Image (tube, helix red, strand yellow):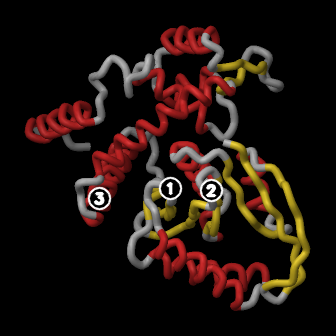
Amino acid sequence: MSAASAASIAAVRRFNRAYTRRIGMLRPRLYDSPYSLAEVRVLYELANATTPPTASALVRDLDMDAGYLSRMLRAFETRGLVRRTRSAHDGREFHLALTAAGRKAFAPLDRASHDEIAALLAPLPATAQVKVVAAMTTIETLLGNAVATTPSPAPVVLRPHRPGDIGWVISRHGALYARERGWDDKFEAMVAKIAARFVERFDPRRERCWIAERDGERLGCVFLVQRSATVAQLRLLSVEPAARGAGVGRRLVAECIAFARAAGYRKLMLWTNAGLDAARHLYDEAGFRLTREERHHSFGHDLVGQTFELKL
């Protein structure tokens, strides 16, 4: 371990001053709301948690003073924004979740945060945006590994698509479903049509593709596309076999849901086929509900198509 130089310390402090000013951390209230930065961060964690966390988990994950968090949660409960549910495994613990009023209060904050970052990046050309995101990822990775007690693998990063990604999505879908499900090349052709339509009609305010990546290696993908003014569709979720079981698919689904809410959609739907049990588990866990089934013959097999929906 080497000591940091005075120049390095000064550079980091200069960056911190500049960035905290740009993202508004010095404002007592965010986005003309009654909430502080810390309160918005707690609301964000509750809104995007795949399972309701406990207060102790929030303290650990946010590195927040337990007393401060407790007072904040009591205030949220008084306003009807948060509810507590006693843990079935430990009667001393309570799981926390946003109420309908809490989600309604958080929605404009989430949209404002999204719009503010979009406005920050918008003046930059696409290549510069990629560099900014890559630099932030590098900072997050290196500083995160520096405080770890044991060496850990590089983190999985979710990033927007860039040239070369769409071809990879088509190729990997075709290869994986042929090997694992025995589907013929008509499936790959269908994926190609979906991906081409996404690129041709891409609206970054309402649609998104995420690529999961670690150390430059693609591990998975998912798309969110507009179906109507109020309905979005999750499409082409895929995770490489070597990355399965590590939470990559869960993160991709959660990112879709968070973006759909921030974009103002009221419902998120998806279409899949019965038998894809790992994906079905992710959808059930995220709150999607099966609304329709129909038999069809596609990709060389008799299949059962399934439509799932999630109210946002």
Mark on residue 206? 1
Residue at left offset 32%, top offset 57% = 134
Mark on residue 129? 3
Residue at left offset 72%, top offset 84% = 179
As measured in the structure, the alpha-carbon distance from the residue carrying label 2 to the one carrying label 1 is: 8 Å
As measured in the structure, the alpha-carbon distance from the residue carrying label 2 to the one carrying label 3 is: 25 Å
As measured in the structure, the alpha-carbon distance from the residue carrying label 1 to the one carrying label 3 is: 18 Å
Q: Quadrant of the N terminus?
A: top left
Using the image as rendered, state which of residue 215 and residue 111 is in the foreground.
111
Residue at left offset 71%, top offset 56% = 269
Mark on residue 245? none
Q: Quadrant of the C terminus?
A: top right
CB under 8 Å between callouts 2 and 3? no
Q: Position of residue 37 (x, y in %)?
A: 40, 24
180 with respect to 148 (left or right): right
User: Circle 3 sits in a helix, a strand or a loop, which is it?
Assistant: helix
The answer to which image quadrant residue 124 occupies is bottom left
Residue 3 vertical placement versus 164 (above, below): above
User: Circle 2 sits in a helix, a strand or a loop, which is it?
Assistant: strand
Mark on residue 232? 2
Q: Amino acid at mark 2?
A: Ala
Q: Amino acid at mark 3?
A: Gln
Residue 129 vertical placement versus 83 (above, below): below
Q: Amino acid at mark 1?
A: Arg
Q: Position of residue 24 (x, y in %)?
A: 29, 29
User: Circle 1 sits in a helix, a strand or a loop, which is it?
Assistant: loop
